[in-house]
Image (cartoon, rainbow, N blue to C red):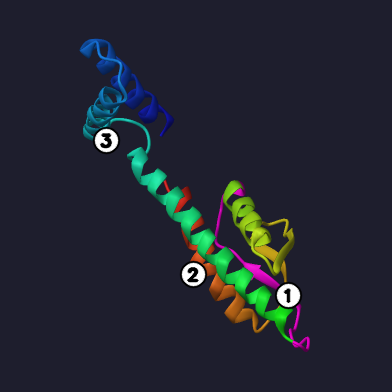
Amino acid sequence: MAVQIVINLLVSIIWLLISDSYTLNNFVLGYLFGLILVYLLHRVMPGKFYLVRIYRMIKLVFIFLLELIKANLDVLKIILKPHISNKPGFFVYHTDLKTDWQIVLLSNLITLTPGTVVLGISDDRTKIYIHAIDFSTTEEETEGIKSSLEKVVREVGEQ
């Protein structure tokens, strides 16, 4: 991915030098030419076409922001109720992620979401121990994480 970005930037800078016009419009045009060139050559370069991974990263940010807003609203509902009726609890989340950085990223995203805290990760890196401020069932909590955050973290990590 990094090689593709560097090649794309080099093509755009070479375009600026060839055209002898150092404007933003010319840089964008050179970047687009470089993008086309990198796309045509991406099969011989290492990794997938880099815009695919950038798209997946942006998708991860938006899905996390959506989950963040939903979790904030859930915590707000708990706070604004006249009587405390939430049921906090601990549960074990079984993950299918393989690499350390994916597990750490998922753990950080879970911890950054209000109402949940990751307490630890098992030594075999298949279980994440989580505390939730309002716990329903293990299946619901697990499905919520697996269908949203873990899915996009896995997509970002795919080669």
Bin the neighbour count of mark 3 within 10 Å (Cα to Cα): few under 14, some 14-19, many 20 and up: few
| Closer to viewer: mark 1 or mark 3 | 1
Q: Where does the magenta region start and end? A: 82-100
Q: N-terminal of the two: label 2 or label 1?
A: 1
Amino acid carrying label 3: it is: Arg
Q: Which residue is disc 2 drawn over?
A: 147
Compute the Cα span from label 3 to label 2: 31 Å
The residue drawn where x is 22% and y is 28% is 33
* Quadrant assignment, res 50: top left
Say above or below: 9 vs 122: above
Q: Are marks 2 and 1 in contact (CB under 8 Å)?
A: no
Residue 152 in the magenta stretch? The answer is no
The residue drawn where x is 55% and y is 66% is 67
Q: N-terminal of the two: label 1 or label 3?
A: 3
Amino acid carrying label 2: it is: Ser
Main SS type for the magenta part? loop
Foreground pick, 111 / 151: 111
Foreground pick, 146 / 67: 67
Q: Which residue is disc 1 drawn over?
A: 133
The count of marks equals: 3
Foreground pick, 133 / 74: 74
Q: Are marks 3 and 2 in contact (CB under 8 Å)?
A: no
Find numbered disc 1 in the image and state the secondary structure of the residue it sits on.
loop
